[in-house]
Amino acid sequence: MDTLDPRRFLSALLSMGIDQYVSGSQERPTLTRLKARVEACTCCELSRSRKSVVFGEGSERARVVFVGEAPGEEEDRQGRPFVGRAGKLLDQMIERIGLNRKDVFICNVLKCRPPNNRDPEAPEVEACKGYLAAQLELIKPNLICTLGKHAYNTLMGVDARITKVRGILTSYKGMRLLPTYHPSYLLRNQGAIKEAYDDMEKVKSLLAEVSA
Ligand code: SF4
């Protein structure tokens, strides 16, 4: 956090129309302050149906940030990302890297649950994606691991199929980005788990490379 450039952080917020974050208070932006802002957000319709805002959780100094799509029913109830069966599988994927939940940061593109777990809609993604950009700007991980097509497409500004891009290393604003499958998809398609575990091996190697 000491290396945070407030101008880049502000530019991420400005991209979503927020202009009072720094100018009103001169306070250094932090994840905690951003979280307070997000928890009060009513920028899209999802604010009406949510039980909780699921900001994300983990280490502010995480070397890896996992980004999913949106909170589901249980996440909405608990206010935490990736709980339940998909969360357990994500925990196993993280263990493959030799880390655990506390070492990484886990969040979603949308911070509020779409009704009936439907896919995020374009206006919702547009309204919310600046928060994700700000989270990544604050944490500055060595690697972003996107889970499923929505996180990848949002950050890369494309409309790709996850089966075409998974496992292919790319970058987002100077940070390495590796797309893999969403754990919910893996629960329905167990044959793909080996590929996801291969991706975690790649994550492990990339982190070792950075540390060397
Ligand atoms: S989904 Fe994002 S933009 Fe919509 S209300 Fe929640 S925090 Fe705000």
Image (cartoon, rainbow, N blue to C red):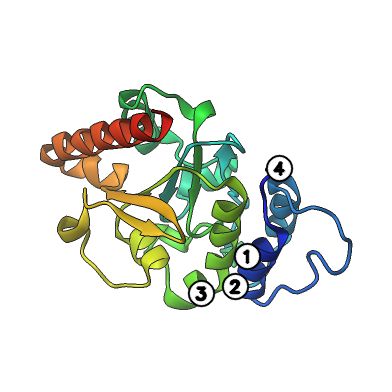
The crowding category of the residue bearing disc 2, from other C-alpha atoms within 10 Å (few below 14, some 14 to 19, many at least 20), is: some
Residue at the location (48% across, 29% down)?
101
Alpha carbon separation for disc pair 2 and 1? 6 Å
Alpha carbon separation for disc pair 1 and 3? 14 Å
24 relative position to 196: left or right: right
Q: Amino acid at mark 3?
A: Glu
Please tell me how many numbered marks the rendered image carries: 4
Q: Which SS class for mark 2?
A: loop
Nearer the observer: mark 4 or 3; the answer is 4
Looking at the image, tell me whether mark 1 or mark 3 is earlier in sequence order. 1
Alpha carbon separation for disc pair 4 and 2? 32 Å
Residue at the location (51% across, 28% down)?
103
Alpha carbon separation for disc pair 2 and 3? 9 Å
Q: Which residue is mark 2?
A: 44
Return the residue nearer the eye: 21 or 106.
Answer: 21
Q: Which residue is mark 4?
A: 2
Alpha carbon separation for disc pair 4 and 3? 29 Å
